[in-house]
Amino acid sequence: MTTVAELPPGFSDKVLSAQSTFRSVMDALARPGTVQRIAASAGAPEGMMHGTAAIALMLFDHDTPIWLDGAISTSDAAKWLKFHTGAPIIDHPAMAGFALIGDPKNLPALDRFALGSSEYPDRSTTLILQVDSLSRGTAYELHGPGIDGSTLLTASIEPHDLFDRLAVNATLFPRGIDVVLVDGSSIVAIPRTTRLVHGKN
């Protein structure tokens, strides 16, 4: 059994690392589809990429219900998250503020997550999706607020139909699902307002 002393550390410098991570996430949200890098020094448990761990340390607290897929919940990630963030880990994705996805090819249907409401569209689940690459793979042309015309994201993403699934955001708006893609220390934000123009290998 892993003890608290054996868990990977959190941020090496809580204040500066949290501020640095916050800026990276805000830059990603302001410029959807562009790759941003999280430089903050932080430990990460098995199954969790550095970018995912840093976002969790920066965003999660005891008021942030989170859902973990099987690839992450079977590791020491749950203990690490509870120790460093105090965030409650829940069994039902529809109640989660964030969902950490370590096995994206088996991503549950989006309607299993919270989609928000007309009164509180922010009460939806944000997916943090660990992917194979944010620098090679399929070329996705994206457009929407924060994008000047269109932008090209080259990435290896599972499920392969992720953007097709996210097309439901257009009919749900202002409700919908926001996604943060993570590849190691690199992140890309796909807000609910971002649309796929086309994607090709």
Image (cartoon, rainbow, N blue to C red):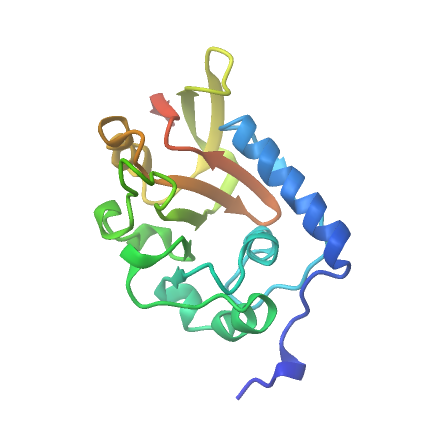
Q: Nearer the viewer, residue 116 or 134?
A: 116
Residue 22 in sight from this viewpoint: yes
Q: Is residue 128 above or below residue 198?
A: below
Q: Is residue 39 above or below residue 192?
A: below
Q: Is residue 116 left or right of residue 28?
A: left
Q: Is residue 77 left or right of residue 19?
A: left
Residue 37 in sight from this viewpoint: no
Q: Is residue 152 above or below residue 110?
A: above
Q: Nearer the viewer, residue 95 or 183?
A: 95
| Residue at the top extreme of this rendering | 149
Task: Please tell me which residue is depicted at 47% across the width and 10% down the height of the picture.
Answer: 149
Task: Please tell me which residue is depicted at 40% across the width and 48% down the height of the picture.
Answer: 127
Q: Is residue 98 left or right of residue 20?
A: left
Question: In x, y percent, where is residue 26?
Answer: 59, 35
Question: In x, y percent, where is residue 59?
Answer: 56, 53
| Quarter that holds the C terminus | top left
Task: Please tell me which residue is depicted at 53% across the width and 58% down the height of the picture.
Answer: 60
Q: Quadrant of residue 106?
A: bottom left
Question: In x, y percent, where is residue 130?
Answer: 46, 50
